[in-house]
Amino acid sequence: MVEKLKQDMVEAMKNKEKERLTVIRMVKAAMDQEHIDRKREINDELLIDVVNKQIKMRKDSIAEFDKAGRNDLSEKTQSEVDILMAYLPEQLSLEEVQKIIDEIFDEVKPEGPKDMGKVMKEATAKLKGKADMKDVSNIIKEKLQ
């Protein structure tokens, strides 16, 4: 995945794709910063973490732009999210996520909302990068009620 990112950056430069190049450079810069700050090895896991953070920030921005009626900025930011999604593993469908969460509930056997942490720990291990963790959290909260 990291190699694909580098190849895509070169390709974007050659094809003069400004927006795509800017997004790829932001991801690469964020990865380099994590590598320096936290002494994390640059690998696919780091790339997935960084891309997830970038997508989350942009989705928050899209919500704010929509509230303010700035559809132009919302669309631009959504296109950045679409570019970033290419660097994540294939996302699971809602049904697949539900099935995995059901399996986690069978393993952990939570007794109520106080066991949210235990369930989320397992869910994060199995679903990180493959599903939107905000949605996963909401599904788990619903099931614990």
Image (cartoon, rainbow, N blue to C red):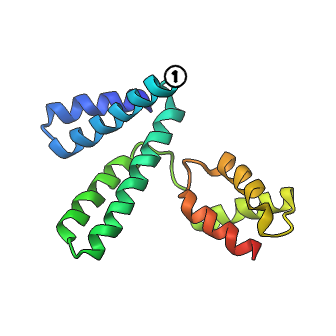
Amino acid type at circle 1 is Lys
Q: Which element is circle 1 on?
A: loop
Percent of width and height locating residue 87 = 42, 42
Q: Residue furthest left?
A: 16
Q: Quadrant of residue 105?
A: bottom right
Q: Is residue 50 left or right of residue 115?
A: left
Percent of width and height locating residue 140 = 69, 67
Is 96 rendered above or below residue 37? Answer: below
- Image quarter where the N terminus lies is top left
Percent of width and height locating residue 52 = 46, 48
Q: Is residue 74 left or right of residue 52?
A: left
Q: Quadrant of residue 4?
A: top left
Is 70 rendered above or below residue 85? Answer: below
Disc 1: which residue: 39
Tell me if mark 1 has few (under 14), some (14-19) or many (20+) residues whose alpha carbon lies within 10 angstroms of its own.
few
Q: Residue at x 52, y 54 (%)?
A: 91
- Image quarter where the C terminus lies is bottom right
Residue nearest the observer in this picture, 21 or 15: 21
Q: Residue at x 38, y 54 (%)?
A: 57
Q: Quadrant of residue 65?
A: bottom left
Residue nearest the observer in this picture, 18 or 27: 27
